[in-house]
Amino acid sequence: RSACAARLSRRNKMKPDEVAACRRVDVFLIKSAPAVLKRRQAALIFSFAVIYYFTEGDHLMAESKLRTISIDFAEQILNLVKFLKSQHETIVSNQIGRAGTSIGANIHEAQYAHGKPDFIAKLQIALKEVNETSYWLELLLKTNYIDEERYQELNNSCTQIRVMLIKSINT
């Protein structure tokens, strides 16, 4: 019996054998649910499992690392936008600013998802934004707005976030 199952059974006043919870939401099961178990109770059990999953589950370390990297990347992008605007480049700077900062916003929002499908959807949006940001970085390099060194630094961060997002989506 996991700690999650113990919390859920105490919270919902159910017997320990009536609730079986695993560390992952996708394998969360309610065994021998009594006939009086209403939708509200089921929703409470599910929401507590989601909270447990995002606060104590296996993905906590990976998710917090992903959040940290994405915030650092957003900071780098905002500094790039400031530089581009000082060079009077507004079209691409606005685009890369939106795409580059929305990566972290979607990752952060995914941690408060309503369930696994919502969680995956938010990470997939973040993955699309990483790909868009990578495109704008390549365009800035080809138009000589940024040098090779800055491009490599930002593109490496993009690649690192992309790899982490793909792993999170696939697990």
Image: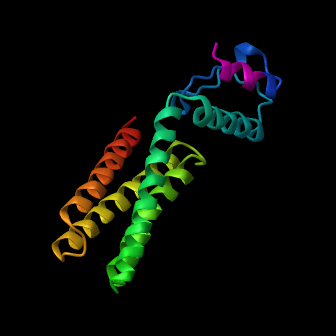
- Looking at the rendered image, the quarter that the N terminus falls into is top right
Closest to the observer: 13 or 34?
13
Closest to the observer: 52 or 15?
52
- Point out the residue furthest to the bottom here: 88
Q: Residue at x 73, y 40 (%)?
A: 39
Q: Is residue 61 visible?
A: yes
Closest to the observer: 142 or 7?
142
- Point out the residue furthest to the left here: 142
Q: Residue at x 31, y 65 (%)?
A: 132
Is 78 above or below relative to 31? Answer: below
64 inside magenta stretch: no
- Looking at the rendered image, the quarter that the C terminus falls into is top left
Q: Is residue 19 visible?
A: no
What is the quadrant of residue 42 in the picture? top right
**In-image side of 136 versus 18 (left or right):** left
What is the quadrant of residue 95 in the picture? bottom left
What is the quadrant of residue 90 in the picture? bottom left
Measuring from the top left, give residue 76's x and y in whole percent: 40, 61
Is 85 above or below relative to 164? Answer: below
Measuring from the top left, give residue 133's x and y in whole percent: 32, 64
8 inside magenta stretch: yes
Q: Residue at x 69, y 35 (%)?
A: 48
Measuring from the top left, give residue 49's x and y in whole percent: 64, 32
Is 82 above or below relative to 169? Answer: below
- Point out the residue furthest to the right here: 13
Identify the main secondary structure in magenta.
helix
Please provide the residue range marked out in magenta. 1-9
Q: Residue at x 68, y 39 (%)?
A: 47
Measuring from the top left, give residue 138's x and y in whole percent: 21, 67
Q: How is the image coloured?
A: rainbow
User: Number of numbered discs present?
Assistant: 0
